[in-house]
Image: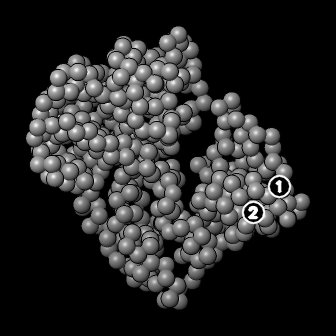
């Protein structure tokens, strides 16, 4: 028996490869499926099943392409409806993989088709559960993503989730290993642990949602409390996961079209393509193509793309470090952005060398803000999330979170300089690029963000532990 967790940090997502005696199964695969095919070939096994725990909202799964490449059967739980060939499992249905058994446990609540897969080893002993978004480590899946009708609320779904946990998962042996679909950083939960594997027994001790004496009413209140609105691209990803999509090979081929600086400019004008710069923050501030938007590959790239660009059909042309163009196209496609139509050949240096116009963003160390605080105290903007801001911020700083920066445009001064910062310097550059595209050019980015600010003598509000907010 072989179980491998294939974890993708930028999505905080875990896919799983299970093999035994010549057969294999993949659970919740990512869009780029060649990695699973290669594993199976190396082990000399045939991929028999592709198990989906539910219709994912935060990424496009690789189920359709993997089935086309391998002939494997796609399996969803009860209530699922797809526009491609799939097997809809019944609650308690048994599947065999070599000498192993997988049992489908219908665990609705996060979504109505959500299903946990219980793995029994060669001796028939309950060994592990693959819980999808039903049970995370330290949390459970949010119950507000599957609302489709006026007769079901997030409270209704939370109550259903309570029953699923207590009738299907909590009665299982404490020694069972829990393999969730996501870890800390995912928008599918709110309180996940940094660990990605645990035992069910430890979760019963550590996870607030599995508290033995918790009533259903308490569960509903705690699970629904403090939920932020889900990213706008989530429903579009669900639609793709239900209906199918283009092969990632086709998406990459279309995106890997090299454009000279002049061609890049023409394509941007004629197609109204978004010019997406995926380099490092400091590289963008030192020079970039006018009206380009920065979202760097070396941060939470895919989630911020989905949060800020919204329309998965938006044409995109890339400004990427040389050699990372395909990586950018692939990571865009993970969250459903399949319309990359080219990239700047030679990257920004080629643009600069061609004599095309460039723009910069003033970026300074936190010590400069410290020195100028008295003059700019009412012109400091914090681009972090609400919980970060409420926990601790610079006195008199205004809260303009990146996630809905466009709703705060009127708050930014049109004349005179102002400072903008985030936690570490990544989000503030994204925010600055968006502001510049909206005609606001007078910002000063604070390098290193709040982490660097805390090393200065800038006046801060009293610290409040985020867990008490």
Taking the spot 27% from the left edge, 35% from the top edge, the residue there is 52
Q: Decide: marks 1, 2 in contact (CB < 8 A)? A: yes
Q: Residue 323 versus residue 311: which sits nearer the camera?
A: 323
Q: Is residue 134 visible?
A: no
**Residue situated furthest right in the rendering:** 374
Dot label at residue 380: none
Taking the spot 19% from the left edge, 54% from the top edge, the residue there is 38
Residue at image mark 2: 366
Residue at image mark 1: 458
Q: N-terminal of the two: label 1 or label 2?
A: 2
Q: CA distance from mark 1 to mark 2?
A: 9 Å
| Residue 372: % across, % down | 85, 64
**Image height check: is 61 above or below 380?**
above
Categorize mark 1 by other alpha carbons within 10 Å: few (<14), some (14-19), many (20+): some
Q: Quadrant of residue 468?
A: top right
| Residue 220: % across, % down | 53, 18
5 vs 103, left or right, is right
Q: Secondary structure at mark 1?
A: loop
Q: Secondary structure at mark 2?
A: helix
73 vs 263, left or right, is left
| Residue 108: % across, % down | 36, 22
**Image height check: is 158 above or below 388?**
above
| Residue 78: % across, % down | 26, 24
Q: Is residue 258 visible?
A: yes
Q: Residue 410 versus residue 157: which sits nearer the camera?
A: 157
Taking the spot 42% from the left edge, 38% from the top edge, the residue there is 196
Q: Quadrant of the N terminus?
A: top left
Q: Residue 119 versus residue 399: which sits nearer the camera?
A: 119
Taking the spot 57% from the left edge, 71% from the top edge, the residue there is 284
Q: Quadrant of the C terminus?
A: top right
Q: Quadrant of residue 266?
A: bottom left
């Amino acid at each position: 028996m072989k179980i491998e967790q294939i974890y993708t940090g930028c999505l905080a997502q875990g896919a799983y490869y299970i093999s035994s005696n010549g057969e294999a199964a993949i659970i919740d695969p990512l869009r780029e499926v060649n990695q699973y095919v290669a594993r199976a070939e190396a082990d000399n096994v045939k991929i028999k099943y592709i198990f989906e725990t539910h219709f994912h909202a935060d990424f496009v799964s690789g189920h359709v392409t993997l089935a086309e490449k391998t002939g494997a059967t796609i399996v969803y739980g009860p209530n699922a409806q797809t526009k491609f060939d799939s097997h809809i499992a019944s609650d308690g249905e048994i599947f065999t993989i070599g000498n192993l058994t997988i049992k489908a446990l219908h665990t609705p609540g996060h979504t109505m088709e959500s299903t946990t897969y219980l793995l029994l080893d060669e001796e028939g002993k309950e060994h592990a559960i693959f819980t999808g978004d039903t049970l995370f480590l330290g949390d459970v899946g949010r119950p507000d993503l599957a609302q489709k009708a006026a007769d079901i609320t997030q409270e209704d779904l939370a109550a259903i989730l309570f029953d699923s946990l207590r009738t299907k998962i909590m009665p299982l042996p404490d020694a069972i290993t829990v393999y969730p679909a996501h870890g800390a950083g995912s928008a599918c939960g709110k309180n996940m642990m940094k660990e990605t594997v645990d035992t069910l027994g430890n979760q019963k001790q550590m996870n607030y949602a599995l508290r033995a004496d918790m009533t259903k009413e308490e569960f509903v209140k705690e699970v629904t409390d403090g939920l932020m609105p889900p990213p706008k691209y989530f429903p579009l990803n669900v639609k793709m996961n239900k209906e199918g999509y283009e092969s990632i090979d086709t998406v990459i081929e279309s995106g890997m079209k090299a454009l000279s600086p002049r061609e890049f400019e023409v394509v941007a004008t004629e197609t109204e393509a978004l010019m997406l710069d995926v380099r490092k923050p400091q590289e963008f501030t030192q020079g970039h193509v006018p009206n380009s938007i920065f979202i760097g590959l070396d941060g939470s790239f895919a989630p911020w793309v989905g949060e800020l660009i919204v329309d998965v059909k938006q044409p995109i042309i890339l400004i990427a470090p040389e050699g990372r163009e395909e990586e950018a196209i692939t990571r865009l496609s993970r969250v459903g952005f399949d319309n990359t139509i080219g990239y700047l050949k030679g990257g920004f240096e080629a643009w600069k060398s061609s004599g095309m116009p460039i723009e910069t963003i003033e970026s300074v160390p936190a010590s400069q803000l410290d020195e100028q605080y008295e003059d700019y105290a009412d012109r400091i903007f914090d681009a972090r999330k609400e919980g970060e801001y409420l926990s601790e911020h610079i006195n008199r700083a205004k809260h303009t979170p990146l996630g809905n920066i466009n709703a705060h445009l009127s708050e930014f001064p049109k004349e005179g300089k102002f400072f903008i910062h985030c936690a570490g310097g990544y989000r503030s550059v994204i925010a600055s690029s968006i502001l510049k595209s909206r005609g606001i050019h007078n910002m000063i980015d604070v390098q290193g963000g709040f982490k660097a600010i805390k090393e200065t003598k800038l006046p801060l509000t009293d610290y409040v532990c985020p867990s008490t907010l």
